[in-house]
Amino acid sequence: MTDGNSRETSEPRPSRSGAERPYVGNSGQGSTSAAHRSVHATPSSKVKGVYYEHEPATLIPRRGKLVRDLHNKGLSPDFIQLVVNLGLVDVHTAYEANVPESAFESLVDNSLVVRPNPAPGTSKVKPQTADSSEDEVHESEAAYVDTFKRLLDSLSSSTTIATLPPDYRKTLYVCKDNQPKRVQGSELKPDLAFYRRANRTKDISRVQILFEAKQHMNEETAYKKYLGQFADYALEIWKTQPLRTFVPLLMLLGCNLYLAVFTRRGYYTTTIGQVMCQRTSDLTSCRDDVLPALRTLWFLLTLPPSNIGQLNTSIHSFNYVDIKSIAGQVVLEVVTYPSDSSIVVGSRIPQSMPIVGRCAHLFKARYGNIDVVLKISSTPINRLPEGAIYEVLATKDDDSNPRVSGIPRVHSSGILANNIDGYRLEYVLMEDCGTTIVKYFDELRASNLPAADIVCEARKCVESVMETLAQARHVSVLH
C-alpha cells in the first residue's frame, strides 16, 4: 500500500473497513469507477526468477501463462463494493445489524490478537530480505500461520460471540494445515485450507477457502509476486467443483489480512484489515483497526458455502443428482437415495478450463434409461442461456423440419445462479451423441487406415461441423 504521494509505507496498517458507509453502485461489471483501482498483472517476460523463487520449475510456465491471461483483469474495490459486486448486500446488511464490533473486544482486551514471542532459544521472526534463505522465509511465514490459527481458535471459543444470534455464533468451517503436504487430489500446498465441518473427506473438491501467509511486504508487491500461485489455486478448485461461481483466498501479510476473489470475469483484491498486533503495547493504538477487521473476518467465516462461491455441494462422478426447484430457484442436489427421475452421474468428459471467461464441466450420465450428457457451464449474461440456444436451433421450419439438423435433444435445462460478476451458472441435460470431436480425431490418428482414408474421414467430419455452424449462423444463433 502507498500513501497519498504514492510512497510505500514501511509498516502498512489499513484504516477502518468502512462498514458504516452506504452501499454504492450496481453490480459493477467491468466498472472503472472511483470505487475501483485497476490492478495490472506484470507481463510474463519477468516471471522466471522474480515471482516464483521458491516454486518447482514445472509450475513456472503454467503459472506464468495464468499471469498473462489475467493481465488487466484485476480490480481493487473496498470491501463494501466487493460485497455489492458479489451480490451479498442483503446478507452483509443482516450481519452488521446483528453483530456489533463490541463482540470482539474481549479478544483485544485479553491480548488474544498479539503474536506470541518466539520460544526461548529460537530466533525472532524477521522480515524477508534479499539475503533471506528459503528456510528462513518458510520459518517466518509458519509463525504467522500459527498465530492466525490461534486467532481462529480464539474467535470460535469466544464467550461473547457465543451470545450472538444463532446464525453468527459459530463458523461453518474447519481449517486444515497442509504444510508441507499437498491438498488431497491436487498439487497445491496452501498454508491452510478451509472445509465445511460436515465434510468427512478433506480434498480439493471440497475446499471452500484457501489461506496463505507471506512475509512483510506491501499489498501491491505481494499480488504482483504471487498472482500466478493464487490463480493456480483458484483454477484447480474450478476444475474440481462444477458448481463454483467464484473462489476466495485469504492472504496474511505480517499483521494485515487481505482477500482475493477470482471470478469468471477476472479477480478482485481488497483489504480486510489488521487482525493482530506484534506487541501487547500496540493494542491501544491498534484497537480501532483490529476490531472492524475481526468483524469482517467473522462475516466471511459465518457465510454458508452458497455465499462464498459454491452452490449446494460439489458434484462428483457416480453421484445421484436430482433437479429441484427451491423458492423459485433451480437446484442440482446430490442425493443418497435416487428416484426414477434422478441423474446418475458417470465419468467426466475431458475439457480444458481457462482461468477467465466461459468454462464448462461435462459428465457422461444416465437419465432414466437414456444415455445423456450433463453440462454445467459459466456463461456471460449478455448471451442467451444454453438451453434457449438449443431450443432455437431445434425449432421447426414451415415444412416441419428442424431449422438446424443434428441438434441433440435437450431433456432439461435451467439457470442455477444469475449474474455473478457478469456470468451465470447454468446446466443442460442433453442427448448423448457419442464421441467428442477431440476423441474422434485422436482415434482417427491412431487408426491403421491409409493416410488418404484418414484425410477423407477428417474432411467429412469437418464438413459436417461447418454445415451445422452455417445453419446456426443462418438462424442468428452461433453456438
Image: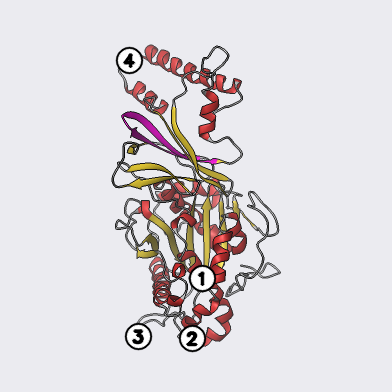
| Real-space Cα separation, disc 1 to disc 3, in angstroms | 23 Å
Mark 4 / mark 2, whichever is N-terminal: 2
For disc 1, the marked residue is 216
What is the span of residues highlighted in magenta in the rendered image?
359-379
| Real-space Cα separation, disc 3 to disc 4, in angstroms | 74 Å
Dots 1 and 3: beta carbons under 8 Å? no
| Front tag of 3 and 2 | 2
In the rendered image, the vertical position of residue 398 relative to residue 21, given as above or below: above
Between residue 179 and residue 102, name the one nearer to us: 102
Disc 3 residue crowd, few under 14, some 14–19, many 20+, Cα 10 Å: few
Mark 2 / mark 1, whichever is N-terminal: 2
Main SS of residues in magenta: strand
The answer to if 284 sits in the magenta stretch is: no
Disc 4 residue crowd, few under 14, some 14–19, many 20+, Cα 10 Å: few
**Tag 2: residue type?**
Asp
Dots 2 and 1: beta carbons under 8 Å? no
Between residue 239 and residue 400, name the one nearer to us: 400
> Where does the image place residue 456, in percent across and percent down from the top left?
42, 13
**Tag 4: residue type?**
Leu
Mark 1 / mark 3, whichever is N-terminal: 3
* Badge 4 element: loop
In the rendered image, the vertical position of residue 225 relative to residue 150, given as above or below: above
Residue plotted at (60% across, 22% down): 475
- The disc at residue 474 is none
> Where does the image place residue 189, in percent across and percent down from the top left?
37, 58
- The disc at residue 109 is 2
Quarter placement of the C terminus:
top right
